[in-house]
Image: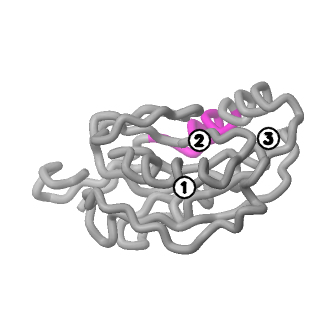
Amino acid sequence: MALHLLISPDEIADIVTELAQQIDQDYQGRPIVVIGIFKGSIIFLADLVRAMQTPIEGIEFIRLSSYGSATISSGRVAIQGDLPIQFVQDRQVLVVEDIVDTGHSWAVLRPQLLALTPRSLKICTLLDKPARRQVNVSLDYIGRRVEDDFLVGYGLDWNEQYRQLPAIYRWQTSAGPAGIG
């Protein structure tokens, strides 16, 4: 297995700053609730909210899983835990995701959040991997589009490893990219 640098810490900082500025411009000082997709978004979310000027009414997390210890999404999204309605109802909600690839997670989560009647609902993703898309989803804020590689670092993991890396890396095995998603 080898790690190949894809996005440096400085490039990540620039992406986060740009996304924060876009969010600030769109919300124009109106308070929001930020919902992070746990665990992958936690590092990105922390940096993003610190870079934003938009008032934050609350930060919540929800856990979605479709990978387990695999490198390719199973396509079956499991939602673990519930968001109490008071965090969503009649609030401006921004969901923060580390990466959107197949689209299944957002396709499952979005209608559930909409059923809780937010004033508005948007999604911000650090990385978008459209080559893996299986479900057509609309994304409001995209940090960077990436190729169909398996990525680790800056919150992204393989089997709970590599999240702590300060940059984002392509992960390849000695057998080559086949089967890496």
Characterize the local packing of mark 1: few (<14), some (14-19) or many (20 or more) Cα atoms within 10 angstroms: few
Mark 1 residue element: helix
* Badge 2 amino acid: Ile
Q: In the shown orientation, is residue 161 left or right of residue 23?
A: left
* Badge 3 amino acid: Met
Q: Residue at x 70, y 68 (%)?
A: 84
What residue does disc 3 label? 52
Q: Position of residue 31 (x, y in %)?
A: 86, 43
Mark 1 or 2, nearer chain start: 1
Mark 2 or 3, nearer chain start: 3
Q: Residue at x 59, y 41 (%)?
A: 123
Q: Position of residue 49 (x, y in %)?
A: 75, 48
| Distance from Cα at disc 1 to Cα at disc 2 | 14 Å
Q: Residue at x 26, y 61 (%)?
A: 74
Task: Say if the magenta span includes residue 11.
Answer: yes
Task: Say if the magenta span includes residue 80.
Answer: no
Q: In the shown orientation, is residue 52 left or right of residue 111?
A: right
Does residue 37 sit above or below 54 in this rendering? Answer: below
What residue does disc 2 label? 123
| Distance from Cα at disc 3 to Cα at disc 1 | 26 Å
Magenta stretch: give its range: 7-17
Q: Nearer the viewer, mark 1 or mark 2?
A: 1
* Badge 1 amino acid: Gln
Q: Nearer the viewer, mark 3 or mark 1?
A: 1
Characterize the local packing of mark 3: few (<14), some (14-19) or many (20 or more) Cα atoms within 10 angstroms: some
| Distance from Cα at disc 2 to Cα at disc 3 | 15 Å
What residue does disc 1 label? 112
Q: Position of residue 69 (x, y in %)?
A: 30, 72
